[in-house]
Amino acid sequence: MMRKLMIGAAVGAAILAAPASAREKQITPYIEAAQIVTADLTNDDVLTYTTIAAGIDATVQSRRVQVQASYRYEHRFAYDNRLADTDIHSGLVRAAVRVANPLTIEAGGLATRTRSDIRGAAPGILQGNVANISQLYAVYAGPTFGSHIGDLGISGGYRFGYTKVQAPSIVSPVNGQRLDVFDDSRSQQAQASLNLKSGSVLPVGITLSGAWSRDDASQLDQVYEGKYGRLDVLYPVSPTLALTAGVGYENIQISHRDALFDAAGQPVVNNRGRFQIDPNGQRRIDYDFDGLYYDAGVVWRPNQRTQLEVHAGERYGSFSAVGSLTYQASKTVAVRVSGYDGIQTFGRQLQNNLNEIPTSFNPGSNTLGQGFNGCVFGAQGGAAGNCLNSALQSVSTSAFRSRGVDAVIAVTRGRTNFGVGAGYANRDYLASNGGPGFTINGFEDESYYVQAYINHQLDRRTSIDANVFANYYKSGIGTQIGVYNVGAIGSINRRFGRFNAFGSIGIYNFGQDRAPSITSLQALVGGRYSF
């Protein structure tokens, strides 16, 4: 937790170290129209849509300002009374603005559609009246700073975030225990640290840090609050290798209010499927930890482009290991591997993942609805990127211990850029064993995912790209049956001045273990006018 909170203070200085030659400003609003055909090959059913969209792509890159934004609003008109018209928001923004040395303001935002219940399948986003899909929005902003007073380094930061998830229009068709539906949450994080480099005053480096975090979710009035303090010692054993050890204190408490149940023992829900608070109920403690933790590890930095850091020890009452590898082979190749372990809520985890996306990213073609709900790859000269899958595997109202690993590589070679992302995510749910109703305390969810893309510029006006992805989800709640989703999308784009003509085709397969799968084919043709 402490290490994640301190990332933001260092990011502000690093991402703003762009040379003057890297200055760029481009703001392009656009309108778009397209025709979509989707064919369910399993059930021999064909559906047709017309889409009207408006959006904006913007990039500002300078020594003081780094901003990239890509946002799109789309309305889909269906030609069949069985289908409902649909509004879709898809977008990502990351920004860092150095307002004064050493103060930087960082911000981010996300709009996408994601799986609501990990136990249910989520088909290709365009297919019919899609069940188990929710529209999601998240934003955050806050200052970071880093400076020195003599040999003493000082850094800190504050971040406020808001996450909103609309209830799915069609609840996941899952038999078994009904789960609650997330509404919104407000997250706050603050941290500060003091650092002495090794060899400046003492032969070892010393870092003293503290942090505070709080997440208030409206659903059942859930509250997460954590206070943290930590002391780290770094001992260099060679110019490129150092040993490190740390001890910390943390106080984390998570609680919620009782849900209301009817005479039959079923939860009372509103018209959006959300549980209602029992006015006569109690506040229940889902998780309560107050004590010390410790770890030790190594830091290896053979050159300025490569850094490996691994820590292992005891935390949350059991073994815990975290680590990271960053490798900037050149201005065109970047690699990032991250292993994590922490007590989380859905809102906090999503805000942390969003914060780790670089301020220069590849927005992708955004065709056929696959926008910003998986891995986001860094653009040329930037960081590798980050995957949002660990948070977006499903929307949870309960807190959980989150463990896993993500790996991302982004490469640019002349007219071609490509990226690969993969990972594993585990959630061990934390909930009170007291009170009425079903408890998911101790149940686990697992996710495996891989995603790859390639884009190639054929000439000044023509480009092609392809995306492939595969996901496997397994929940310990209820049936314990795995759910999978695989797909591939290919697109071509041809520019005629301000007008772009494009076409895409995609194939998707989704289903559950020990059950027939469903395969669909989707095609799109359209045009975009940029202002």
Image (cartoon, helix red, strand yellow):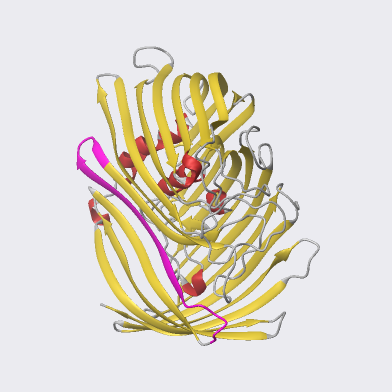
Residue in the picture at 27% in, 43% down:
105
Answer whether residue 387 is visible to the viewer in this image: yes
- State the image coordinates of residue 425 (x, y, percent, origin top left): 62, 46
| Quarter location, residue 201 | top left
Locate residue 25, reporting x and y percent: 24, 62
- Quadrant (top left, top right, bottom left, bottom right) of the C terminus: bottom left
Q: Is residue 501 visible?
A: no
Residue beneath the point at 40% across and 23% down: 209
Q: Residue at x 74, y 70 (%)?
A: 517
> Is residue 492 shown above or below 320?
below
- Please name the predominant secondary structure of the magenta segment in the image: strand
Q: Which residues are magenta?
A: 80-104
Residue, x 36% and y 65% (percent of image)?
71
Asked if residue 83 lies in the magenta stretch, the reply is: yes
Q: Which residue, as the protein is rendered here, is positioned at the far front? A: 263
The picture quadrant where one finds residue 87 is bottom left
Q: Toward the viewer: 125 or 96?
A: 125
